[in-house]
Image: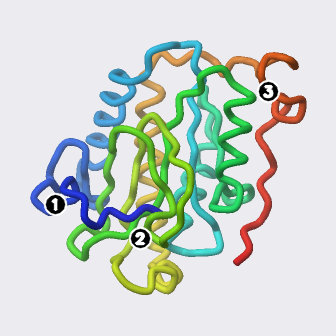
Amino acid sequence: MWNPFGRKDEDPADMAGPQRIHYQHPQAREKLAVALRQNFLKRYKSALSPVILLCIGTDRSTGDCLGPLIGSKLQQRELPIVVCGTLDEPVHAVNLQETLDNLNGRFEDPFILAIDACLGRTESVGYISIKDGPLSPGTGVNKSLPAAGNFHIIGIVNVGGFMEYLVLQNTRLSLVMSMADLIADSIEKCLRELPLAAVPPAKAEGGGGNASADARIIRNEALTY
């Protein structure tokens, strides 16, 4: 869970920018796909770098399940990417560092698109933003977690600033599901228009990873509070 408070780039005047779109905009899918494509073309330098979709969150919280929902939806589609973080195997505060270590051990120079839910101002709820650089998850609930991603997507699911855990638990599932559908469709549209290579095999043993990491992405354990 990411928190934008205090950041100038979350000013309401920026809501109509090309990297920011409301999920109910009539052309939201097309505009988000175009923005994603521009970001990939600008940052994705090598066809040898596998594309990793890192969907952060947990199915134990309605507001924080945006990432796992997107991961589950895209895992079912035939795309040349690695999806990490689903409803069945979420990536969250407990296992994020282990997941990142495993990805770096399994692949050579992975290119990571990180996705997370976000708390924001009242007028920002429902907006989806694409941002440069790594995502810093956990800041919305005062946790210090490792940053991740070459660039990232955040979806503002509710109002932040007080009792964040309670706010997340009481976020409308309808909103989160609609945003997840939109983001998943936009990512698929973007990726199908890019010349991505097939996911390369994992590093051979002795190439910098460990044997278990070479075989698979870790099976994430359930989040406990």
Quadrant of res 110: top right
- Expressed as whole percent of the image width and height from the top left, the position of residue 152 reads 42, 44
Residue nearer the viewer, 133 or 13: 133
- Viewer-side label of 3, 1: 3
Q: Say what secondary structure mark 1 lies in.
A: loop
Hey, what amino acid is under mark 3? Gly
Tell me the residue at 38%/24% (across/down): 43
Q: Say what secondary structure mark 3 lies in.
A: loop
Q: Which residue is mark 2?
A: 175
- Identify the mark nearer the N-term, 2 or 3: 2
Residue nearer the viewer, 186 or 68: 68
Q: Is residue 104 left or right of residue 3?
A: right
Q: Say what secondary structure mark 2 lies in.
A: helix
Q: Which residue is mark 3?
A: 209
Disc on res. 69: none
- Expressed as whole percent of the image width and height from the top left, the position of residue 199 reads 66, 22
Q: Is residue 61 above or below residue 8?
A: below
Residue nearer the viewer, 164 or 75: 164
Hey, what amino acid is under mark 1? Asp
Q: Which residue is mark 1?
A: 11
